[in-house]
Image: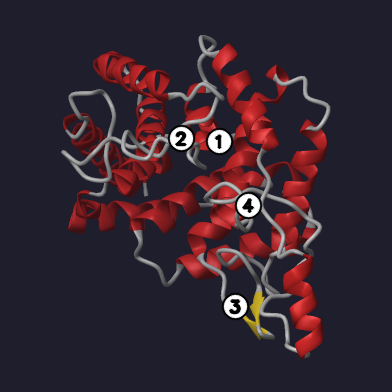
Amino acid sequence: MVVILEASHRKLWLMLQEAVKILLTSQNPDGGWGAFASKRSATEITALALLALQAAHDNAEEPALRKGKEWLIKRQNADGSWPLNDSLKAPSWSTALAMIALSESGQFEERLVKAGSWALEQEGSKPGIFANLILALTFQKKAVQLNEDLIGWSWTPNSFSWVEPTSYFLLALKKTKRLLASKTLEDRIRQGELMIYDRMCDNGGWNYGNSTVYGDQLLPYPDTTAVALIALQNWRERKENQMSIRALAEMTKSTDSGLALSWSAICFSLYGQEDAELRKRLVERFAKTKFLGETKAIALGILAIGNGARLFRV
């Protein structure tokens, strides 16, 4: 048994070392990271890469961490938000991930306050009176069944609330709430949490935005479910959370996605669930595919293997 455990730990260590090396060599000259090596730097990818290097930190990574943080700092908009990249400079959902990446350092409190204030002003849109009136007058069945009064966050400003961006913003606000003095903070966090619970699929887990469409039940996805559960970690004992963690365990049995396996491993770690088998499969998948060189998947793999769950703990 000891030999088996030592072999397993060595494989984890080797994957971690190789993945970190790939991440370091794929950093762009401007300090950021793109979806793949040499692709345009993007806020989402740079934030996840920084979190990954923080999880696997040693002196060798310090220059890369510094350059990555400088890339983020230089791209923050005047209103406190972050753009998707240098071409799409409008405020974006990736602000939440930038907040999470910078929240581990005590150097950026003023920037985090500005970002948090911007985030609290953002609201996903409702269908509106006109759309509901059309449905009523034509006796049409509503496409989705959800509580329209529960407001979360959207992928793009002034659009529909989705589970993933709402989860990211909840995490960002929970990790920085000690810095934010807004009277609306607790209410927005509670609204976001209730919105996510409202979208939960019948047997646990989450689809991207709804649980049903035209009366048909939608299936949950492992990555979306894991991210939602991470955002709701302070309610881990609730029956909805427990039902969804069981659903996630079932979903991970049939997925080979590096993204899904990594988010799930992070989630299980935060919930105190056994994840040795999941980590083993993650290592095997990386050995076979190197996650096709996708920076996001490599960064999440490092976070899953390198005790990165602590960076998402609230």
Q: Nearer the viewer, residue 207 or 21?
A: 207
Residue 237 in sight in this render: no
Residue 232 numbered mark, or none: none
- Left or right: 98 as drawn, with respect to 126: left
Quick check: 56 above or below 154? above
Instruction: Give the residue at mark 3.
Output: 218
Q: Quadrant of residue 113?
A: top right
Callout 4–callout 2 Cβ contact below 8 Å: no
Tag 2: amino acid: Gly
User: Which disc number belongs to residue 308?
Assistant: 2
User: Disc 1 residue type?
Assistant: Phe
The percent coordinates of residue 211 (x first, y second) are 66, 72
201 relative to 214, above or below? above
**Percent of width and height locating residue 187:** 82, 39
**Residue 229: which numbered mark, if any?**
4
For marks 3 and 2 on the same chain, the one whose residue lies earlier in the sequence: 3
CA gap, disc 3 to disc 4? 18 Å
Q: In 3D space, how far apart are the residues under numbered discs 4 and 2 (Cα atoms)? A: 16 Å
Badge count: 4
> Which element type, helix, strand or loop, lies under badge 2?
helix
Percent across and percent down for residue 2 are: 35, 44
Q: Amino acid at mark 3?
A: Leu
Callout 4 environment at 10 Å: few (<14), some (14 to 19), or many (20+)?
many
* Residue name at image x 35 percent, y 45 percent: 301
Whichever of callouts 3 and 4 sits on the residue coming sooner in the sequence is 3
SS of the residue at dot 3? Answer: loop
Looking at the image, tell me whether mark 4 or mark 2 is earlier in sequence order. 4
